[in-house]
Image (cartoon, rainbow, N blue to C red):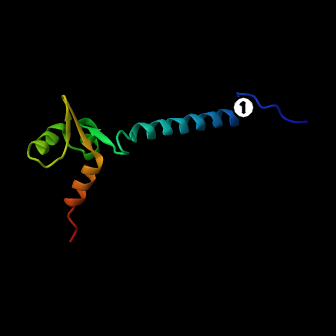
């Protein structure tokens, strides 16, 4: 005769824990990969500062001195991710 599986069985609990973990990962991926216009990602000051491990003040200086391309819409500053990648590649220094 077959075994009855209940919601309190160890395997069932493990399955639902794993499903929750996968769901959380998918939500995290969607939040990190926002395609706004023409498949381009745009980052805020806070997002870019976190990714580059710079202060928002440093980003302000880079904008002021024409180092960093950006968009300003009202009081909001946005950076096109492809511009940042291109800037990083252009300024890459090879090791000896």
Residue that protrudes farthest toward the front in the picture: 38
Residue that protrudes farthest toward the left in the picture: 65
Circle 1 residues within 10 Å: few <14, some 14–19, many ≥20: few
Residue at 21% from the left image edge and 54% from the top image edge: 87
User: Can you say whether 87 is above or below 23 in the image?
Assistant: below
Residue at 65% from the left image edge and 32% from the top image edge: 13
Q: Is residue 23 left or right of residue 93?
A: right
Residue at 36% from the left image edge and 39% from the top image edge: 36
The picture places residue 88, in percent across and down from the top left corner, at 23, 55
Q: Secondary structure at mark 1?
A: loop
Front residue (pair 62, 83): 83
The picture places residue 49, in percent across and down from the top left corner, at 24, 41
User: Can you say whether 93 is above or below 9 in the image?
Assistant: below
Q: Is residue 76 left or right of residue 32?
A: left
Residue at 41% from the left image edge and 36% from the top image edge: 31
| Quarter of the view holding residue 91 | bottom left
Q: Which residue is mark 1?
A: 9
The picture places residue 79, in percent across and down from the top left corner, at 24, 42
């Amino acid at each position: 005769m077959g075994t009855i599986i209940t919601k309190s069985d160890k395997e069932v609990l493990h399955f639902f824990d794993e499903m929750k973990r996968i769901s959380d990962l998918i939500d995290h991926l969607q939040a990190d990969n926002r395609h706004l216009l023409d498949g381009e990602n745009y980052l805020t000051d806070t997002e870019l500062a976190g990714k580059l491990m710079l202060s928002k003040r440093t980003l302000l200086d880079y904008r002021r001195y024409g180092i960093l391309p950006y968009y300003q819409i009202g009081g909001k500053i946005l950076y096109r991710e492809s511009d940042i990648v291109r800037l990083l590649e252009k300024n890459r220094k090879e090791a000896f």
